[in-house]
Amino acid sequence: MDRLHGKVALITGGESGIGLATARLFVAEGARVHLAGIAEDRLKAAAAELGPAAADWSRTDVTQEPQVAAAMRQAADRFGGLDVIFSNAGISGEIAPITAYPTDVFRRVMDVHVLGAFLVLKHGLPYLRDGGSVIITSSVVGLTSAAGISAYATAKHAQVGLMRTAAKEMAARGIRVNTIHPGPTDTDFQRDIEVRATGAPPDEAARLFETQIPLSRHASPEEVAASVLYLASADSSFVTGASLPVDGGMQI
């Protein structure tokens, strides 16, 4: 349990769901983590759970460049640099046809996912040590799509283009850049999407979504976190510019 021994990771969206599950796994594997997010109470609780020697936090809206720059600087000052960046912050947006999709919501979804990931890379890469790793959370709909999710699917596809560009630019420093593409995962974020998409109660909505998954179940946050660990560690030392589905076969 030391695949990240002595490493330092910054995780956006680190206060809950996949981000928090990843933080827990990273610390168990020997890393120290900086949690960046917008839910201050959850950030404090998560950092306290992980322990003051292993975790720090900052309230960080990834669409606000000064806040992103400050989070990177705080993490590097506290822990002496960065080895892993996990760009994981996200929102779901509305579910509506393109002709009725609210323009302000479309813009906000793009800002959080695309501008946010860009700012995390722009201000994080200068602190990232050679040989480091960047992982961006896209989605199964960054490989496919569905009706009604134009903003979310467009943003998640755009993150792949950003990842591929960064992978080319960072290769000379041995820095690997990849995306993960989770399918439905057992989180509050996903449950909200399912209820709004189906109009059904949470349990029924989950079952409806599971009919679309070849493995017939949701992922746990810990299963997705294990994929992030793979891309963060030396286990994936020759993997860059890749899109890793973690979706129970939905992209097939």
Image (spheres, grey):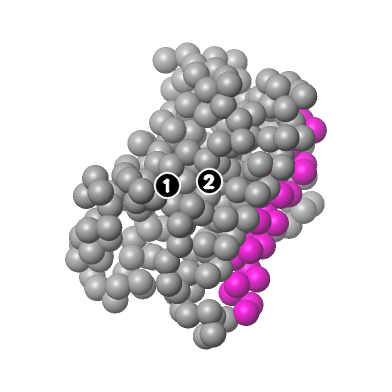
Q: Residue furthest bottom?
A: 100
For image coordinates 52% across by 37% down, the residue present is 47
Q: Is 160 one of the magenta-colored residues?
A: no
Query: In the picture provided, is 110 more to the left or to the right than 81?
Result: left
Q: Which residue is mark 1?
A: 182
* Element type at mark 1: strand
Q: Confirm or deny contact between disc 1 and disc 2 (CB under 8 A).
A: yes
Q: Residues within 10 Å of mark 2 (few under 14, many from 20)?
A: many
Quadrant position of residue 70: top right
Q: Which residue is mark 2?
A: 137
188 or 172, nearer to the observer: 172
Measured as percent of width and height from the top left, residue 165 is found at 71, 42
Q: Is 125 one of the magenta-colored residues?
A: yes
Judged by its main secondary structure, the magenta piece is helix
Mark 1 → mark 2, Cα distance in angstroms:
8 Å
Amino acid type of the residue tagged 1 in the rendering: Pro
| Above or below for 26 versus 192 | above
For image coordinates 66% across by 41% down, the residue present is 164
Q: Work out whether residue 144 can be spotted.
A: yes
Q: Residues within 10 Å of mark 1 (few under 14, many from 20)?
A: many
Quadrant position of residue 71: top right
| Above or below for 9 versus 195 | above
Amino acid type of the residue tagged 2 in the rendering: Thr
| Above or below for 187 versus 22 | below
Q: Earlier in the sequence, mark 1 or mark 2?
A: 2
Q: Work out whether residue 41 can be spotted.
A: no
What are the residue bounds of the magenta stretch?
A: 103-127
Query: In the picture provided, is 187 more to the left or to the right than 213?
Result: right
51 or 168, nearer to the observer: 168
